[in-house]
Amino acid sequence: MLRISSTSSATRSGLRPPNLAGLRWAYSRQCPARRTYASVTDLNNFPKPGEQLYGFTLKRTKHVPELQLTALHLHHEKTGAEYIHVARDDKNNVFSIGFKTNPPDDTGVPHILEHTTLCGSEKYPIRDPFFKMLPRSLSNFMNAFTSSDHTTYPFATTNRKDFNNLMSVYLDATLHPLLKENDFTQEGWRIGPENPTALGSGEGKTDADGKLVFKGVVYNEMKGQMSDASYLYYIKFQDHIFPDINNSGGDPQRMTDLTYEHLKQFHAKNYHPSNAKLFTYGDMPLTDHLQEIGSKFDLFQKIQADKAVKAPISLDSGPLNITVKGPTDPLVDKDMQYKTSTSWLMGDTSDILETFSLGIMSSLLLDGYGSPLYRGLIEAGLGPDWSSNTGYDSAGKTGIFSVGLTGVKAADVPKVQQAIMTTLQEIHDMGFDRGKVDGLLHQLELGLKHKRANFGMGLMQRLQPGWFNGVDPFDALAWDDMVSAFKERFSQEGYLEALLEKYLLNDRTLTFTMKPSPTYGYDLAAEEATRLAGKLSEASESAGGEEKAREKLTARELELLEVQEKARSQDLSCLPTVHVKDIPRQLERKAVRHSTLGDVKVQWREASTNGLTYFRAINTLTGLPEDLRMLIPLFTESIMRLGTRDKSMEQLEDLIKLKTGGIRVAYHSSADPTNIQISREGLSFSSYSLDQNIPAMYELLRTILQETNFDGPEAESKIKQLLQGDASGSLNAVASSGHSYARRSAEAGLTALGNLNEQIGGLTQVQHTGTLAARSATEGLGDAITKLKAIQQFAISNSSALRTALTCGSESTSANEAALQKFLSALPSSISIPSSQIQPTSFSRNTKTFFPLPYQVYYSALALTTVPYNHPSGAPLQILSQLLTHKHLHHEIREKGGAYGGGAYACGLSGLFGFYSYRDPNPQNTLDIIQDAGRWARDREWSEQDLAEAKLSVFQGVDAPESVSEEGMTKFVSGVDEDMEQRKREQLLDVRKEDVREVAHKYIVKGMQGASLAVLGERKDWINEGSGWAIKNLDMTQVAEVIVKGDAGSAQPGVD
């Protein structure tokens, strides 16, 4: 999996805790008892520095009480491997092995190697043990990541046997992979016939099936990545500011230069203990880990590894301006297609205090609507949203600070840099507001107290990038020391202003601009055709003629198909596994109690929360008209943008940061657990704060909901900016999650919930947003604003439509109840939702819909209805989805078809079953496989091991660790109580083979006639209306939105 190096990029609202240069942490859901805490982290239980154990020498230790952990740094004497172990009273244990992998070119060799190492190893000599381990594990996280200059293989699990199994597989996969050539051609790249399955069977063979094309899982993954204009901008920017770090993910135009021999050489040079960094975390014994790892590492001799830390270009000679070509966005105004940014090189990131301080400075400059750069750039109308590289990136040895915009007009490109420089000089002269710094530090304090289930994985992901680039991870763990040192420096007048002057008030900049090219997509296709012709010419010369080359390539493809097919019946007994008996039959119940305050139901979860209170509420809306529903996403953004008559949004943001962990208002929808055709919708509200700040939290929420001023002189222009920002990022959002959008479209006509989800978060909403964003100044947004004001009137009420949930310590329940009562008393006791004369949009069943979009690969989904949550068939349907994914679809769609991903899903609550493919080069073949999947499952002779693996896969999600704030929330959000969960648990554990075959026939085979299908991608000849396809263009100029038709006057609500 490709991982993009992240920056602490700007957020639109600024109401979430800031990243602060990678120094914001995640926290465990467990609140350890004093005795247990001492036993896990007590330094007396570990070796002393200088002592050796299983080939490792303990170099140093560090106890960090504020994070409730003890860190140990070890060194493997024979090979030089580095190892950090973090002991903490957390049962969700983490392992990671990583290697420094500076990419030598743009062929993507680190990325392709990441895939091929997981395709078989000496101890586990079967095909693709990584994916075959997924259903043999109870892990809650299992993956591999290729970053810009290092590659990591992490997992997390609460089961000790599972931990040992996965560690064994990961160590053997990385250190002793088989690296077979057919794995390289499958995962990397090859040339072969477009549809070899048809050629092999001889049935339905067409000329198109034999057409030779470039193939490969990573090749298609990266073609998909390059369809994301934000990723393309970011990676091209990295190419120019870090020319010594090539594209680790791989550029498809260069990927076909990679050879099998080069891949093997890169592994031998880099995947070695001498180049390794290991990380373990949790409550499992260190000695057990050392014994296993030491026995593997002792087989190696030390080598000289390439651990070079690459530096960016020098900007000492003055400003550098670079312009490259990029794609146009059909969902954005044709005159707003430029992307541009200005970047500076910052200090050495091993200076932890300065790095922390620069992260604070970046947040002050960029985060929130009141930030100076937001006001100076976006609010000034130069562009609707930040560029993908905006923020402070401290992942490398040298930090980089960038500020840029997307959706810029050609004439405004030079104005962006001018505005950046002007704004920076102004903030330097005025100085930074101490109150805003206090707000950021308060967010960090809340982050320390907030208990998360994935603390260990978050810690690993924060430490490793710097660790690979010379940053001491022990320094990064010294949290209290760092905050104290910052406060001392900040107390000195002009500290942050001096940093701003030191690094940013100069012309040592790189200004990077991407200008739109209308022929960009065609140019890519032409380049690929030319490159393919060149490769075929080389193959013809080598084979002794074009026809012989074609025969050779086709034969190789059919040979690969045969290898892939034989792998389906491989003996997997060499692979370790946990067992269904390891799954507790009884649900771990979380005690909740219920009360009422007037007509409002209150759910209480009393737990150890470190002095925090978590608030959540849902206001159910009955009879909501479609034209108002379509505007709810804009409403939830607007109330966090406009401010009130008395306070600007900047002032409200400051208060939110000082008093809360953020405020979130969102659309909520859920199916009835007993009837999939019944759904409920409304608005949800959530926040958390220190116990003493709960009254302030409620008052801020009330103010934002009731007092947001939609009539202010700048309200319309600010709403327009929100719309343009959403529209400018929508094509890229679809490119990164195209299967999700296809799924929503396919589900829209099947159930009431599917209809709602498509309107709020699907392509219907994307087009609606683009339509509003494209309105001219003369059209204005007056009708939309009237409806936003109408939503404000019924958003929340002190009535039976509202239900709330509080999670807090038992010592604060009385104070919380009093504060909640006061909050409710300030809300209207009854509301009226206006009716509408507009006919609701009808989404048909049994449809085939195609959305033409400028992507190089396809995204598909097929959905059909099944049964509600409480139906006995729901459990075997969930098991069936896992069996289809791991035993059939992964093999057919990914391995043989070359898509990056594909599978089946069963949503127990919505009662929908479906299939999807992701970054798929051959959707026609995929659709044939999907439509035959039910028959395949019905006729399959399932083994007991197959069934056991599917159950393990399901329970990875069912029993995944929860953050304390999520405990007891299933019933509150969905209506599924713990008794219902217990029955479902037992049904899942008791599913039989005949149950699976029965539901496959009843709901999938028979249900296909009522299924709906959606595909996104480039339109080709096989997509035509004569074949039953409905073709829907998303061009923003096609205005067919209900909001335009609505009668603004009819949207005024009344309050009873």
Image (cartoon, grey):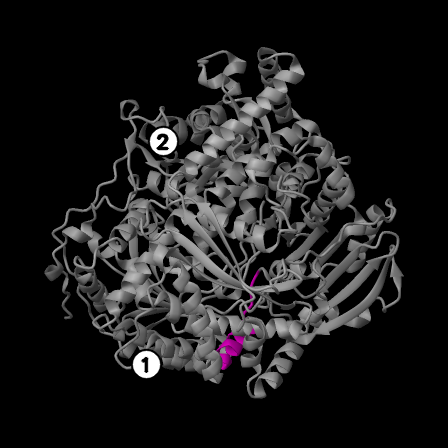
Instruction: Tell me which residue sits at (46%, 30%) in the image.
Output: 526
Instruction: Tell me which residue sits at (72%, 59%) in the image.
Output: 284
Q: Which residues are magenta?
A: 437-453
* Residue 927: numbered disc: none
* Horizontal and vertical percent position of residue 488: 62, 85
Vertically, is 449 above or below 923?
below
Vertically, is 577 above or below 720?
above
* Horizontal and vertical percent position of residue 80: 83, 55
Residue underneath mark 1: 822
Circle 2 SS class: loop
Residue 843 location, quadrant: top left
Which amino acid lies under the numbered mark 2 shown in the image of this protein? Arg
Residue 445 lies in the magenta stretch: yes
Residue 716 location, quadrant: bottom left
Please say whether residue 162 is visible from this viewpoint. Answer: yes
Dominant SS in magenta: helix
For disc 1, the neighbor class at 10 Å (few under 14, some 14 to 19, many from 20) is: some
* Horizontal and vertical percent position of residue 405: 42, 59
Please say whether residue 409 is visible from this viewpoint. Answer: no
Vertically, is 402 above or below 100?
below
Image position of 640 (left or right of 286): left
Image position of 243 (left or right of 389): right
Which amino acid lies under the numbered mark 1 shown in the image of this protein? Lys
Residue underneath mark 2: 1019
**Quarter that holds the C terminus:** bottom left
**Quarter that holds the N terminus:** top right
Circle 1 SS class: helix
* Horizontal and vertical percent position of residue 462: 62, 62
